[in-house]
């Protein structure tokens, strides 16, 4: 018995001429929190529906707990699913909704009662069993949907943007809780979202999806700090994109000509001298200093005029305009440095941060 | 200062104005006829004249002279069978249109109702032309030297088909309208949670569309009970129904008082049917969110 809970092999799904899911191969471990992150229309929902058995793949196989379930109908797959708009059964009470999977399995009465008691405690929805879904708040409805997905202890729980309909505050709270339930139960979760913060907060690993394909599958920290493609670099985190040319390559470093200035970044793979490249530097890796300050030795330096400071609480975004008008965003602790709009400033960052990729469509 | 509110804009005035058409309808087209029928049913008719001497003879006749109850019973059985047939037939039709009809939905529903454009008499004549002794079916059988199908001619079965044909569109429309508001996604939820398709239908689709279905059942059952036209065209002597006998009292024998008593009895049966249907509806159990707050 391996540690693999779910195996996807070369899954492909086409709708007419759109390829919604394109040769997706993946293994998810027992007890793993796995997120599918991607923009709208990238095929996340379709992939989940294929795993659940609600959609038949055109090609590929799905293995759950060592068993090939590719041809099996959804009710034979031991998979739970939580949907974006909750989709509670409106004609059943909370208790009946949660017990639905056990009822379908024909679990004995005593077991049902015991499990119900356990799950409502776990999810803090005890006392609501007799209510109907429309008598619940959004957050409560979402918990009920989660409880329904978890009560039968499925081999795998699929979640399709389950928090997207909740307000920001509640979402933050639920992010932490969902993660906690997942740890406690040890059930692997496949969590779909197009919200990168959500994915970064909750996941063990993240797959970044784009037009049906995986751009990068890696532990979340790696996806964030070491993007594999330009798309990942621009989609995860907040980064400045600078399209320039490679002026020189030396010792794993590239010198980039950009906007009348020069700076160094780790050498982009597959781009020779003279090639157009897109360089991404995360906003929080940059520092703004009053112009004329001493930057650390060897650091990259760019001049500019501070156009605006957007205060966000813990941090502030400093919008710096280059002489050409191009803007660069720097995120820093809000108190530093004490610069006003209109001041000339210096942006610096270490030459070993930032990622370059051969420019797409150039 | 706010402008003084004119009479028309006062909420009570608006309430009355909005309510008036409904109240008038109920009074003139429902209450008034019913009350007069009830009154007539206690009077007496003799040689095409009605006399206001109060008595119970009409009810005695209807309830204790076996033939009337026999016809009533026959009508009830016919209505039950026809309604059940319509129900079984209409569900898949309505389901198919609601789920797969796409942008042709409305067109498909209208197509089902199209025979209505021609009026009942014409529709029934058309049926006669299909099922009757010289109808399409028997002509075709005759051409191949096969014997005519007897059971389609002038009997209960033929009039049953006729009635079902007349009222099927009501059933389909009622169920279709209900399914329009049904979230088919819920079926996916049921399936993922372990329900086989049939189970998903019984636990989710059926209860959530029960109001619409109950309306369809009522809309078919009640006119079936009173049906008189179809048996005249297709029923033959054995297919005669309560409605036909009731009609006779008014347009042939001139026994209006007896007819009224028959009408009152029919009305009572309808009330029972509606009460039973109403009793089956638990608003909280239909997904109707306005209830039970
Ligand atoms: N039933 C369908 N018929 C035709 N095309 C479909 C169908 N379902 C999805 N698609 C297409 O497949 C692609 C992927 O859709 P999908 O719903 O999986 O995206 P998603 O990543 O879940 O997007 P979102 O974040 O908006 O939910 C889209 O281009 C979509 O238009
Ligand atoms: Mg989606």
Image: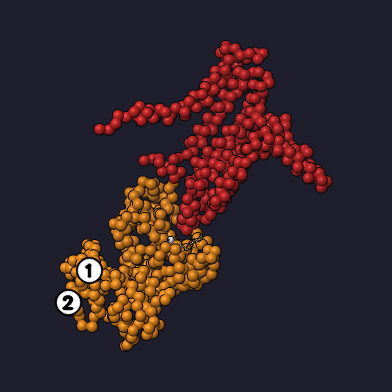
Neighbor class of circle 1 (other Cα within 10 Å; few <14, some 14-19, many 20+) is: many
Residue B120: x percent and y percent?
65, 34
The residue most toward the front is A324
Secondary structure category for the residue under label 2: loop
Q: Is residue B245 left or right of residue A95?
A: right
What residue does disc 1 label?
A306
Q: Is residue A206 left or right of residue A55?
A: left
- According to the picture, the residue beneath numbered tag 2 turns out to be A293
How far across and down, in percent of the image, does residue A194 sit? 38, 63
The disc placed on residue A288 is none
Q: Image point 45% across, 68% down: which residue?
A: A211
- Is residue A355 or residue B35 the one in the foreground? A355
Q: CA distance from mark 2 to mark 1?
A: 15 Å
The part of the image, by quadrant, that contains residue A121 is: bottom left
Q: Write down which chain is painted red.
A: B
Q: Which chain is orange?
A: A
């Amino acid at each position: 018995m391996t540690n693999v809970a779910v195996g996807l092999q070369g899954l492909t799904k086409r709708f007419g001429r759109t390829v919604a899911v394109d040769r997706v191969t993946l293994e998810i471990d027992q007890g793993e929190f796995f997120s599918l992150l991607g923009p709208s229309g990238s095929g996340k929902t379709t992939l989940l529906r294929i795993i659940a058995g609600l959609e038949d793949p055109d090609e590929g196989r799905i293995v759950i707990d060592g068993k090939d379930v590719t041809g099996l109908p959804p009710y034979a797959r031991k998979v739970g699913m939580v949907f974006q708009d909750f989709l509670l059964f409106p004609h059943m009470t909370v208790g009946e909704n949660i017990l639905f999977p056990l009822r379908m399995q024909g679990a004995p009465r005593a077991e049902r009662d015991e499990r119900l008691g356990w799950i409502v405690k776990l999810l803090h929805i005890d006392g609501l069993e007799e209510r109907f879904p429309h008598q619940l708040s959004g957050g409560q409805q979402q918990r009920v949907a989660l409880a329904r997905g978890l009560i039968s202890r499925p081999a795998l729980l699929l979640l399709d943007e389950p928090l997207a309909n909740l307000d920001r505050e509640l979402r933050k709270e639920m992010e932490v809780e969902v993660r906690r339930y997942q740890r406690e139960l040890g059930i692997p979760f496949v969590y779909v979202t197009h919200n990168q913060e959500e994915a970064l907060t909750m996941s063990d690993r993240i797959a970044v999806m784009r037009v049906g394909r995986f751009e990068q599958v890696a532990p979340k920290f790696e996806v964030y700090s070491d993007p594999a493609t330009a798309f990942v670099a621009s989609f995860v985190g907040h980064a400045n994109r600078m399209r320039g040319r490679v002026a020189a390559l030396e010792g794993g470093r590239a010198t980039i000509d950009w906007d009348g200035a020069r700076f160094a970044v780790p050498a982009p793979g597959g781009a020779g001298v003279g090639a157009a490249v897109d360089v991404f530097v995360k906003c929080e890796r940059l520092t703004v200093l009053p112009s004329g300050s001493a930057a650390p030795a060897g650091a990259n330096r760019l001049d500019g005029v501070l156009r605006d400071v957007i205060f966000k609480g813990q941090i502030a975004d400093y919008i710096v305009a280059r002489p050409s008008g191009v803007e660069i965003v720097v995120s820093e602790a809000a108190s530093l440095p004490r610069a006003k709009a209109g001041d000339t400033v210096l942006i610096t960052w270490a030459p070993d941060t930032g990622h370059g990729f051969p420019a797409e469509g150039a | 200062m706010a402008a003084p509110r004119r009479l028309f804009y006062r909420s009570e005035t608006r309430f009355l104005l909005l309510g008036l058409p409904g109240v008038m309808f109920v009074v003139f087209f429902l209450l008034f006829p019913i009350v007069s029928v009830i009154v007539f049913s206690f009077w007496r008719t003799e040689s095409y004249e009605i006399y206001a001497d109060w008595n119970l003879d009409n009810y005695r006749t209807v309830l204790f002279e076996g033939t009337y109850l026999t016809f009533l019973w026959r009508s009830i059985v016919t209505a039950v069978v026809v309604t059940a047939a319509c129900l079984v037939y209409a569900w898949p039709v309505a389901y198919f249109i609601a789920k797969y009809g796409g942008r042709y939905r409305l067109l498909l529903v209208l197509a089902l109702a199209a025979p209505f454009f021609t009026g009942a008499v014409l529709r029934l004549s058309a049926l006669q032309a299909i099922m009757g002794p010289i109808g399409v079916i028997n002509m075709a059988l005759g051409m191949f030297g096969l014997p005519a199908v007897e059971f389609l001619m002038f009997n209960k079965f033929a009039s049953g088909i006729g009635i079902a044909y007349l009222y099927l569109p009501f059933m389909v429309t009622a169920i279709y309208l209900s399914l329009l508001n049904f979230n088919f996604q819920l079926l996916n939820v049921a399936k993922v949670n372990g329900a086989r398709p049939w189970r998903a239908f019984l636990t989710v689709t059926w209860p959530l569309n029960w109001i619409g279905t109950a309306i369809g059942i009522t809309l078919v059952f009640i006119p079936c009970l009173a049906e008189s036209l179809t048996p005249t065209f297709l029923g033959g002597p054995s297919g005669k129904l309560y409605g036909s006998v009731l009609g006779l009292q008014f347009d042939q024998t001139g026994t209006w008082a007896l007819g009224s008593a028959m009408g009152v009895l029919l009305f009572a049966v309808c009330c029972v049917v509606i009460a039973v249907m109403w009793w089956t509806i638990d608003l909280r159990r239909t997904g109707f969110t306005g209830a039970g707050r």
